[in-house]
Every structure is written in C-alpha cells, then in structure tokens.
Image: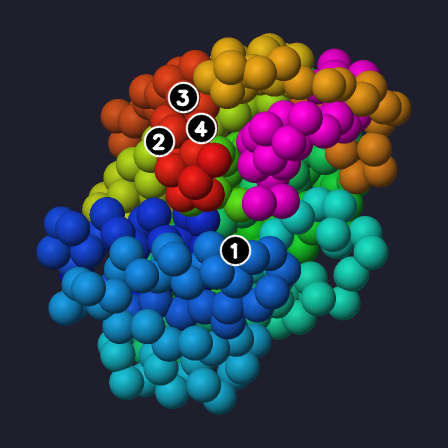
Amino acid sequence: MKILVTGAAGFIGAALSLRLLERGDEVVGVDNLNDYYDIHLKKARLARLTPHKNFTFLECDIANNEAIASLFAKEKFQCVVHLAAQAGVRYSITNPHVYAQSNLVGFLTILEGCRQQNVAHLVYASSSSVYGANTKLPFSTLDNVDHPVSLYAATKKANELMAHSYSHLYDFATTGLRFFTVYGEWGRPDMSPFIFTRQILANKPIDLFNYGNHQRDFTYIDDIIEGILRVVDTPSTQHYRLYNIGNSQPEQLLTFVETLEKHLGKTAIKNLLPMQAGDVQDTYADMDDMKRDFNYSPKTSLDEGLEKFVHWYKTFYGV
C-alpha cells in the first residue's frame, strides 16, 4: 500500500513509518522539522527510516497548501495517516496562533488533498484531551465532548468536526483516533516520562501537579502503533468513525513515578503543586469499540513499558 504519513519525524509518526516499511508498504513521510523540541531527536528518528528504499521524505509544512496539493497529485496515495500537529496542552495557552495554523489550516489542507485526489481512507490523530471537563469514566466516544479546557483540545475537536463534514459532503472515509497519554522509546522530551527521567537522573526535583493526584491512561507506543495498523488495514464500512486508543488501565501519577524510580534505581525529589491550567483530572479510555471492530486490546503494562523506555533513554543519551 502507498501511504502518506504526516509528522513522520514525530514520536508516533516515526514509529508507525518504521512498522509500515518493515512490512513492505511504500511510505512518503512529511514533516516540517520545527524546533518545538530537540531537532536532533527528530533527525535521529528519521535516520532509522531513510535506509529503507521504499521511504521518501519531504520537509514541508502541512499548512503549505500549494506544496501539499502538488504532493497529493503526484503520489496518488491509497491511504493517509495524518499525525502532524502542534502538540502540547500547556504550549497552546502561550502560543495559540501556532495551533490555529498547524492544527486547523494544516488539517484542512490534508482534507482537501484527500478530496481532490480521491484518497480512499484518511486516518488522523485526535486526542483524549477532547474529553476536557468530562467527569464520567471511562471516556467513551459516545460521550458529549463540548467542554475543552485548552485550545489544543479545541483544535482536536474541530478536526473531528471538519472530518465529519468532508466525509458527509464528499463520500470518503475518515477515522479519528483519540490517543491517550502515549509514552515509550523515541518519545517527546516535553512529556512527563522524559522530563521526570531527566530530572531524577540529575538529582533535580520533579513537579507533580494536583499534588500528584492525577490518573492517566498511559499507553505504550507499540500498542498505539498496533491500533493504528488495525485501522489502516481494515476497510471502513462507515464514512466517519471515531475510536479511543488507550491502555484502559489508568494509573495514579504517583504510581507512575514510583515505577520510574524502580527502573532508574533512584528516588525522585517531588515538588507537589496545585492543579495546572489546561489539565484534566483523570483520563481512562473505554476500548469496547476497538475490541469489537478490530479485535484489538493493548498488551503492555506500565511496568514493562517504563522498563523499555528507561533502557532506551540511557542508551540514547549515554547516561
């Protein structure tokens, strides 16, 4: 299959591209290689993909309508997996315009490319953040999600609405995947596993908001990728679909820290702080739809996933 993966130098995009290449798919990767976090890490991820002869990379901003339209017209993709976005809840509070350009204009550019070139299936990243102020657990795709608590979450909800309108108007399949707190090897330096590991190894304190009383549905990267592949490989019988992809086993933040301490062999200095703007109290994915439609369930425990992450981190950074 010929597949476009946007955000190919990102955490999820690079991992997905590698799996697709290893099984023989032809992958065209797009990424703007911005400096939101360490560009060297992004290039190191890409370096794992470029040896594959069936991989092509284009450094390009997804909001560049002319370049993206030309790419779609040239390549004639069978499937598009759209993972490029400006990520980060807290960053959206201080840099809102970046999110409008990447997450709204960029997504429209991808939708238009799919429409104009008759792409059969668009799979795109949404987020558990869309559940916002909801308190009913576990979070279900049947729940109302009209109360986002960050601009990032609002842009992801907007993506779902935009996809619905295109599926309805132009008769092509879109599938949105609401990812829950993804972690693992080659992850993002702005996420808690990275930050906590770096701080603990440096004997510096870690900030635990809401005094550590958050619950998060930490989901290991390999489980996320397996979920995406199941969706990509299964022809859609509906034009518009939404699914959660999470571990469906929420863990207390303090349990997460204790598990990380175990694998690092060091105790964290904890700085307990009040709830932070834009945060949600708890996340917990209802995975019934994924089990029913794709026979999919995540397999990696938090203990196993953090052990793998710590091993990778120490090897990659030489610590």
Report which residue position mark 4 lands on. 310
Q: Residue beneath label 1, please? A: 164
**Whole-percent x, y for residue 217 in the image:** 54, 23
* Residue type marked 4: Val
Q: Earlier in the sequence, mark 3 or mark 2?
A: 2
The residue that disc 2 covers is 223
| Mark 4 in CB contact with mark 1 (< 8 angstroms) | no
Choose between 196 and 218: the one closer to the eye.
Answer: 196
Q: Could you say whether the residue bearing mark 4 is in a helix, strand or loop?
A: helix
Q: Earlier in the sequence, mark 4 or mark 2?
A: 2
Confirm or deny contact between disc 1 and disc 3 (CB under 8 A): no
Which region of the structure is painted magenta? 189-215
- Residue at image x 46%, y 43%? 317
Q: Quadrant of the N terminus?
A: bottom left
Label 3, residues with CA under 10 Å away: few <14, some 14-19, many ≥20: some
Marks 4 and 1 sit apart, C-alpha to C-alpha, by 40 Å
